[in-house]
Amino acid sequence: MARKATVNRRKCAYCGACVAVCPVDANELVETYLEIYDDRCNGCGICVRTCPMGALVLVEVN
Amino acid sequence: MYDVVVVGAGPAGSMAAKTAAENGLKVLLVEKRQEIGTPVRCAEGISRENVERFFEVDKKWIAAEVTGAKIYAPDKTEVVMSEEMAGNEVGYVLERKIFDRFIAREAAKAGAEVYVKTACTDFERRNGFVRVKLRRMGEEWDVEARILIGADGVESKIGRKAGIIKTLKMNDIESCVQYLMTGLDIDQSYTYFYLGREVAPGGYAWIFPKGNSSANVGIGVLPKMAEKTAREYLDAFIEREGIEGKVVEVVAGAVPVYGEIETAVSDNIMLVGDAAFHADPITGGGIANALAGGYYAGKVAAEAVKKGDFSAGFLRKYDELWKDDFGKKLKRNKKLQLKFLEMDDATINKLAASISGKNLSEMSIRAIVTELIKAHPRLLWDLKSIFI
């Protein structure tokens, strides 16, 4: 089972903290929301620890 | 063909666009959000000196004028820096929504084209120029520029793609949350800072007055040291301090506390503001350096166009200017930050107690640290050479 970051858009404040620390460029602030690219995310969890709003979590994926 | 394309209309980007346009360049300033100045990602404090350096102050963008600062150690020991101690460095708390728009308007007034709701999706260097890919409301097109200025914030895509900066590590970023609260019973003439690992690991909590019983109540934590999210620390701080008021706005952001980067340029490209990690590693303040960096970038862009030289070699003039102005301070405050990160709450209490009630001759980190070194030479001896 691999882990991927996922965003709760209702909690996300669109601040870019996760983008600044993502080592694999798996996320991007797109116009009015945060996009996470599953194919690039390696599940390291740095974004989860950095997100000031607690809007990101790691989920298990097949 | 534009002389300069600036990506990001925060204070750094707009200042760069304004300066470049004032120097006769053809400038395009793009902002991906639909409005300039929102959402605010800042506590909005700046010293009077640093604003007045560039602009005649307009009351419309000053939310509150503060005459001093109060710093609290974990045990509530208070260090007060009052107006007479503060000298000329009396501070403003800005209304960024108005301030940012004011600078962008100044850029437009100077002749820059300004596009909002326009994102830079990519760029590439070709034949000595930069081809910048833009997207606005579904429409995509390219423009050519001699120089691309990345003012795209702490998450700067331009800086990383150009290989100028790397992704921030968890100990080089402050994770911040702030509430704009109203109905507060605070003395509006002070800014308040709260230190301590329990309150804000690797950072501090703040209350910055915004007039009419309102204030920015926020916190910054270092993710590497934090066990909870910044928002959870902020809620705990508000409860601990018994701050009663209504939250009317939530702001979140990230502040780079990297210190001085080696260079903020590469061929045809310059970075300004948070994109160049120009925020102060101790205070997290970034507006003053953003304004200065933007100004220097605009000036150097004008010189580069005049010379027809857009190489990294020529653009390093910009590095020289920002390093001479505030680079040394970034480097120094990074060392200081690392030193403070080693300290536990008991040590901070001891340090605060030793300067509490002392007459600090100026409201600056240097003044405070100088006093601390005098009181605790053993503890802070290794900082002596950079502060005294």
Image (spheres, coloured by chain):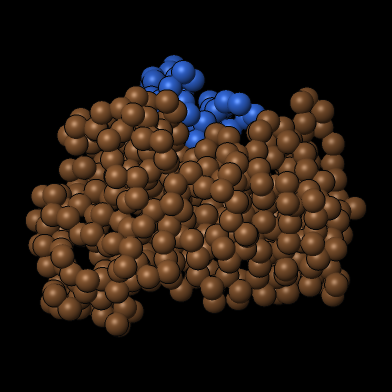
Chain colours: A blue, B brown
B229 and B63: which one is in front?
B63
Which residue sits at x=44%, y=47%?
A: B64
Q: Is residue A30 above or below residue B188?
A: above
Q: Is residue B151 above or below residue B315?
A: above
User: Seen from this angle, which residue lies furthest right?
Assistant: B1
Which residue sits at x=55%, y=60%?
A: B51
Which residue sits at x=70%, y=47%?
A: B104
Q: Quadrant of the C terminus of chain B?
A: bottom left
Disc tally is 0
Give the percent coordinates (x, y) of residue B219.
Answer: 33, 41
Give the percent coordinates (x, y) of residue B329.
Answer: 43, 70
User: Does the rendering let one see residue B224?
Assistant: no
B10 and B232: which one is in front?
B10
B171 and B299: which one is in front?
B299
Q: Is residue B166 above or below residue B387?
A: above
User: Based on the displayed image, in which of its 4 quarters is residue B314 positioned?
Assistant: bottom right
Give the percent coordinates (x, y) of residue B316.
Answer: 66, 73
Which residue sits at x=34%, y=24%?
A: B246
Query: Is B371 on the left-hand or right-hand side of B268?
Result: left
User: Does the rendering let one see residue B188?
Assistant: yes
Query: Is B9 on the left-hand or right-hand side of B332?
Result: right
Query: Is B290 on the left-hand or right-hand side of B133?
Result: left
Give the percent coordinates (x, y) of residue B345.
Answer: 13, 53
